[in-house]
Amino acid sequence: MTTVWESGLAGPAVHALVIGVGAYDWFLGGTHHEKGRRGDWLSKEFTQLASPPVSARALCEGLLEGFRDLPGGLSLGSLEAVVSAKEQMILKGDDGAEVPLGPATLEGVEEAFLSWYDRCDSDPDNVALFFFCGHGVQVGRGPQILLLQDTGKNSHGYFRTALELDALVEGMEGNSARTQCFFVDACRFAPERLYREKEVRATRLLEPLGRPITRDRVVLHSTQRGAKAHGSLEGEGVTHFTEAVLRALLTPESDSAGAAWTVTTETVGKFVRELMAWPGLRPDGIAMPEQHCDFSSLSTSKGGVLFSFEEAPPVPFHFDTSPGEPLSEAEWTLMDRETRELYASRLPMPEPWIGDGPVGWARVEVSFADGRFRGRGDDVWMQAPCRARKVEVHEL
């Protein structure tokens, strides 16, 4: 089964397709892996993955919890999902019913894709949202290939059961949905031997149109061309990119009058990129390997609206001291810059202060009860997507 949830309501909505692949049949450790299989020199290049199934579930749960009933704007209209993991993944669907997901084989992905495509195609004001997390391959400036559970089934046509991303994105030009968003959490490099191949072919779910259609579209990659995408350092946790996507989808930007708060194809790419570099996204302080988000977009004006919110959302902040040694003795306050109304405060702790505050000008101050250090206040413009600030501290 691939349909997790469907609103059944008429009119424009956001329709999502989520694919997570961690269990690979023909890779090392897979259920069908054969050592020394004739013609198979690629399987040893890839591993089983723990993060993609967890990341796909986190995105599904985030969409279901945060976007089903948004007042005054587009809401989630449907969710298709296929996930391949060590054990079959279960999600809560309609009326709390348990929905078994998967598998993310070529057949399973085709079934989910066709349902998703048709729903997106039902109204030009729909939003098409695509998410993939798993192994990826990209040879030079060639197309990126997304590896599915049964990739490698044919050792002489190894990527026949994988997807060509570029053709899918360009083929969606034929879909009526004018706003389209693609999140791709996968590597964009290739084993060295593939560079000697004449052509690396994968399945095209759609054929690109000969003439592009004007629309609002953004394609976000978790890493740059020729680079690796990293999973969770904790092993079976959500990837850094997925965390950034979830936060960015809940991080609208106001219009010039401050009357509307929207997430658009123009804002979401830059927000994901900023969030991946924001220290507050990792409150445990674990340093991630260097990884730079890459995105491209087409836009008719200011970008197509993915989601809109009636009120200004809280702005996440990350406050630290410079140097860091006095942090464990620092007492923090965040207040309105003009009225001095207190928004939040925190007693001394050894970790940076991570929290949320209102949009607008605020003042952050740090003080020390024992008088060994002196810190000054700082005016901060609190605006989406996030703020990281180090307050200068001097020893007396």
Image: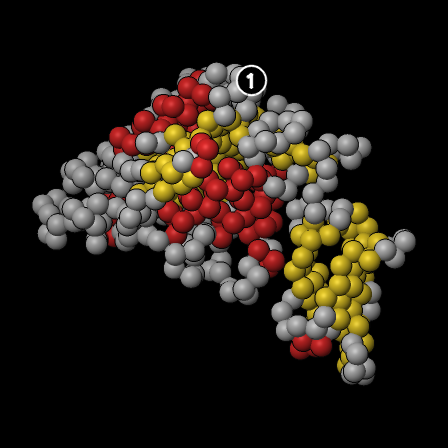
**Rendered image quadrant of residue 179:** top right
**Rendered image quadrant of residue 285:** bottom right
- At horizontal 60% and vertical 27% (from top left) the residue drawn is 74
Residue 233 position, x and y percent, is: 43, 61
Seen in the picture, residue 121 relative to 308 is either above or below; the reply is above
Residue lying at the far right of the rendered structure? 339
Q: Is residue 13 left or right of residue 256?
A: left
- At horizontal 82% and vertical 69% (from top left) the residue drawn is 376
Q: What residue type is labelled 1?
A: Gly
Q: In this view, does 349 lie to the left or right of 175?
A: right
Seen in the picture, residue 378 relative to 168 is either above or below; the reply is below
Residue 188 position, x and y percent, is: 39, 45
Asked if residue 130 can be seen in this view, the reply is no
Q: How crowded is mark 1: few (under 14 residues within 10 Å), some or many (20 or more)?
A: few
| Quadrant housing the N terminus | top left
Q: In this view, does 222 lie to the left or right of 361?
A: left
- Residue placed under numbered mark 1 in the picture: 11
- At horizontal 52% and vertical 49% (from top left) the residue drawn is 243
Residue 255 position, x and y percent, is: 74, 33
Q: In this view, does 51 lie to the left or right of 147?
A: right
Seen in the picture, residue 153 relative to 29 is either above or below; the reply is above
Instruction: Name the residue nearer the viewer: 28 or 293.
Output: 28
- At horizontal 29% and vertical 38% (from top left) the residue drawn is 103
Asked if residue 340 can be seen in this view, the reply is yes
